[in-house]
Image: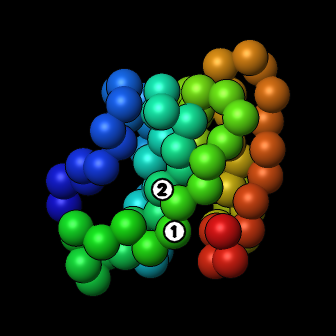
């Protein structure tokens, strides 16, 4: 699967759960991709800052999003 869709800037980070791929980058968009359709973005969230890191907790119940300014936000990956 190749993720494209971040039109402005680079994709800086990606995180994979059992169902989804999440990407983030300079365009400040957190994008949720469905593995069953590699070209379909399931959900997109516009963030306030450039995204630099993504990671899940051990049970894939929370997605941590780290920003260029040092802030971290947490999302439920299922309901993003």
Q: Position of residue 76 (x, y in %)?
A: 73, 68
- The structure residue drawn at horizontal position 27% and vertical position 82%, both measured from the top left corner, is 36
| 33 vs 30: above or below | below
* Total numbered badges shown on the rendered structure: 2
The local crowd at label 1, few if under 14, some if 14 to 19, many if 20 or more residues have their Cα within 10 Å, is few
Q: Position of residue 75 (x, y in %)?
A: 74, 59
| Cα separation between marks 2 and 1 | 6 Å
* Among numbered discs 2 and 1, the one appearing first in the sequence: 2
Q: Position of residue 23 (x, y in %)?
A: 44, 48
- The structure residue drawn at horizontal position 60% and vertical position 55%, both measured from the top left corner, is 45
Nearer to me, 49 or 36: 49
Q: Quadrant of the C terminus?
A: bottom right
Labelled pair 2, 1 in contact (Cβ < 8 Å): yes
Q: Position of residue 70 (x, y in %)?
A: 77, 20
**Quick one: SS at disc 1?**
strand
Q: Which residue is mark 1?
A: 43
| 36 vs 31: above or below | below
Q: Is residue 59 visible?
A: no
- The structure residue drawn at horizontal position 81% and vertical position 28%, both measured from the top left corner, is 71
The local crowd at label 2, few if under 14, some if 14 to 19, many if 20 or more residues have their Cα within 10 Å, is many
Q: Is residue 23 visible?
A: yes
Nearer to me, 43 or 37: 43
Q: Which residue is mark 2?
A: 31
Q: Where residue 72 is drawn, which disc sits there? A: none
- The structure residue drawn at horizontal position 48% and vertical position 63%, both measured from the top left corner, is 32
**Quick one: SS at disc 2?**
strand
Give the side of residue 33 with respect to residue 24, left or right: left
| Outermost residue to the left | 2
Which color scheme is applied? rainbow
| Outermost residue to the top | 69
Give the side of residue 15 with respect to residue 53, left or right: left
Locate residue 52: give its quadrant: top right
């Amino acid at each position: 699967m190749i993720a494209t869709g971040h039109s402005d800037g680079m994709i800086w980070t990606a995180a994979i759960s059992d169902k989804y791929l999440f990407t983030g980058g300079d365009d400040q968009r957190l994008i949720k991709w469905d593995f069953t359709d590699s070209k379909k973005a399931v959900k997109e969230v516009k963030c306030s800052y450039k995204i630099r890191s993504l990671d899940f907790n051990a049970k894939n119940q929370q997605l941590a999003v780290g920003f260029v300014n040092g802030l971290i936000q947490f999302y439920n990956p299922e309901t993003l």
